[in-house]
Image (tube, rainbow, N blue to C red):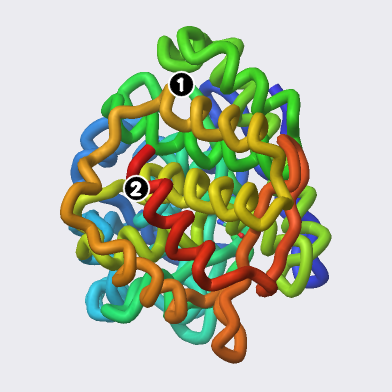
Amino acid sequence: MPSFAVETPGRRYPILVERGSLAKLRDYIPARAGKVFVVTTEDVWRLYGGLLKKEIAQSPHEILFFPGGEARKRLAEVEALAEQMMEKGGDRSSVVVAVGGGILTDVAGFLAAIFMRGIPVIQIPTTLLAQVDAAIGGKTGVNLVAGKNLIGSFHQPLAVLIDPAVLDSLPEREYRAGLFEIIKHGVIADPDLFWLMRREPGRVLSHSPEVVDRMICDSVRLKADVVSGDEKEEDRRRILNFGHTFGHALEAETGYAQFLHGEAVAWGMKAAAALGEMERVLPREDREEIVECVNSYGPFPTVSGIDPRRLAARLKSDKKTLKGRIHFVLPERIGAVRITADVDERFVLKAIEDALAC
Ligand code: GLY
């Protein structure tokens, strides 16, 4: 299976997509590295610790556990991990190996970004969402009460090792949550990928190896290309935020406890598609296709009792809001989006209400 590359002004690194790639970790640890700090969660380590321990056996190493959960994705947890690294002999030659889902890869990546002003990190994503999105592209960070990922840093990894086979042990809900980031990739820039997701939910949901490998490879190729062209999200990378501005508001409004990130993005894509249609940017048939596609990978947590006005107010604290103006990624058709701040505020509220109803 292929290897992809991200090429930014400061670094070129590989993304290996291969069944069995976890057993290649030792090839990616720099020869002159000091102590290796694996940062993971207990459940993930129970599954892959035996295999990965063999890979790091030649290097001095320590295993650090993050408790997991969006609500624990906070600066205090990063500080606690950094204190453990100091107690266990970490220094500027140390390397972090992040093993887990998107929350873990964001937290461990941020730890590496700021420990002694920055040490290398190797990303080993073990959820679908982390494999197709979170672990690629160097975005790292933690949440504030005011919103998601509001403290963070761009810190590109040394390498990303993706093993699609690990998804066979992923809880079904986590797997489905990752599918929404793949649908996102289809809507923003890859119509073939979108129509695969739209027409083949049976094969997607039954983890057909051929379909799983294609979904991951197409997503990784697209993301590597976008990040290589715009590492710091000054331009084209913003398209990857399709569904996220609305989705982040939903996550924050429900205390990060009710929706998985991918589920919130799913809802956010329906809201963005509704806004696109109201703004006469997106044809009605395309909006219906997006909504049908998203809904075919439900069920979703209930949205009853959520106040649309509170969600609309939360949009203003998103990172994508510049000088008080909210920037929206609106689909124009399947495979193309535009970024605009020029929308009618009444439509924003109406789009939220519509999406809460479908
Ligand atoms: N998850 C969006 C990005 O990496 O830019």
**Element type where label 1 sits in the image:** helix
Q: Position of residue 15 (x, y in %)?
A: 66, 42
203 in relation to 96, above or below: above
Residue ID at (52%, 76%):
319
352 in relation to 141, above or below: above
Q: Which residue is mark 1?
A: 165
Assess whether mark 2 and mark 1 are in contact (beta carbons under 8 angstroms): no
Tell me where residue 63 sits by quadrant: bottom left
> Identity of the amino acid at label 1?
Ala
- Considering the image in quadrants, where does the N terminus appear? top right
Q: Which residue is mark 2?
A: 356
Q: Earlier in the sequence, mark 1 or mark 2?
A: 1
Residue ID at (55%, 65%):
139
Does residue 140 appear anywhere in the picture?
Answer: yes
- Considering the image in quadrants, where does the C terminus appear? top left
> Identity of the amino acid at label 2?
Leu
